Image (tube, rainbow, N blue to C red):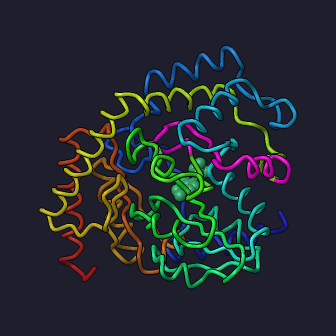
Amino acid sequence: MQIQGVLQRQLELRRQQRRHRSLSVAAAARDFSANDYLGLSQHSQVRAAFQQGIQQWGAGSGSSPLVAGYQTPHAYLRRQLSEWLERDNVLLFSSGFSANQCTMRALAPLYERVVLDRLSHASLLDGVREQRHWKRFAHNDAAHAKKQLKPEATNLIVTESVFSMDGDSAPLSELAALDADLWVDDAHGLGIVGPEGRSVGGQFSQAQVPLVTATFGKALGVMGAALVGTDSVTDYLVNFGREFIYSTAFPAAQAAAVSAAIKIVQSAEGTQLRHQLATNIALFSDLAARANIPLGDSRHAIQTLVVGSDANVMRIGEALSSQGFKCGTIRPPTVPEGTARLRITLTAQHQEANIRAFVAALADCYHQLTETQAV
Ligand SMILES: Cc1ncc(COP(=O)(O)O)c(C=O)c1O
């Protein structure tokens, strides 16, 4: 291969920085890294809906949505989502990454200014990078967002409901009050925040937040995503959104599984699962505080422990792994330089004993490290 040498050099650089990543098969036991916050990926009704969907519709959709890939379960899921989130319309995508990129690439050129939270997800940044008229605002700083807007012009503000790396929440009411359209990526809020898990859809009207990204691979336990918004936006994306137009629709069976997951989220069982998740988050935070583990400022399922250097985060991650625990070890460029961290996710499925054992192991690893060096 002609670029073999270039590939090897770049990879070697990553290794020297201790930032080389590789795939490892996830072990089921004692996992504190997944985004399956309610455990729905394993839920019998979600699995049954997927299986029945495959029996009825086959394994794949066969083509892009505008050709023949758009089938009855996709249409059902769109209606279900737009009713649940009280928005005009919904467009389905194979992933949240694709939904964000498609929407950003299609809509950003139509605004005179686009401003994004500094810590916005890579899919949003990648979509806007090619534009000339975008700016970032300081993380969760609505006053700074306001300063970045272009006066007397069309502006789009982009943020996340719950941030993927820190678990902290955006000041959505303040941002919604600014003179701009607001787009909220609800990847880590949908299903777990607010009554019925409606998150942004339940808290804000379409007029306040006209664009929402809903993803199906986190609390809903499946995969895929939707852009939820006005009729004119979804119509525009059907006609101009390249990632939507030129990509195979996800399987109808998957749409059926997502619909089943939403029904659980809306039901009394969903309320009970959210309650259990909240109990687990509170237990974890309480135990961590007692063990002097300085967690970040999050009341959500995503909890972080910033340890600074890449080497330290890898050391703790490996020590936990040797005791059978898995949590995320996040390094730059995913997070800013010098803020490598453990990303710990709680789910409704965690047992009290497991959480206690994890915090005890984490406290040991962390304090051993801080005793030998300043973290
Ligand atoms: C905030 C946020 N937006 C979008 C995505 C992408 O979603 P998906 O995993 O469905 O591609 C993620 C997932 O990592 C995310 O954390």
Q: Relative to 108, does residue 264 appear above or below in the rendering? A: above
Report x, y in % for residue 102. Answer: 74, 56
- Write the start and end of the magenta stretch as one range: 215-240
Does residue 22 appear in the picture of this structure? no
Q: Of residues 339 and 186, which is closer to you in this image?
A: 186
Q: Quadrant of the C terminus?
A: bottom left
Quarter assignment of residue 366: bottom left
Residue at 54% from the left image edge and 62% from the top image edge: 21
Does residue 328 appear in the picture of this structure? yes
User: Left or right: 309 with respect to 247?
Assistant: left
Residue at 64% from the left image edge and 32% from the top image edge: 79
Q: Relative to 129, does residue 35 appear above or below in the rendering? A: above
Q: Relative to 238, does residue 297 appear above or below in the rendering? A: below
Quarter assignment of residue 115: bottom right
Q: Residue furthest left?
A: 290
The total number of labels drawn is 0
Residue at 55% from the left image edge and 21% from the top image edge: 49
Q: Is residue 145 magenta?
A: no
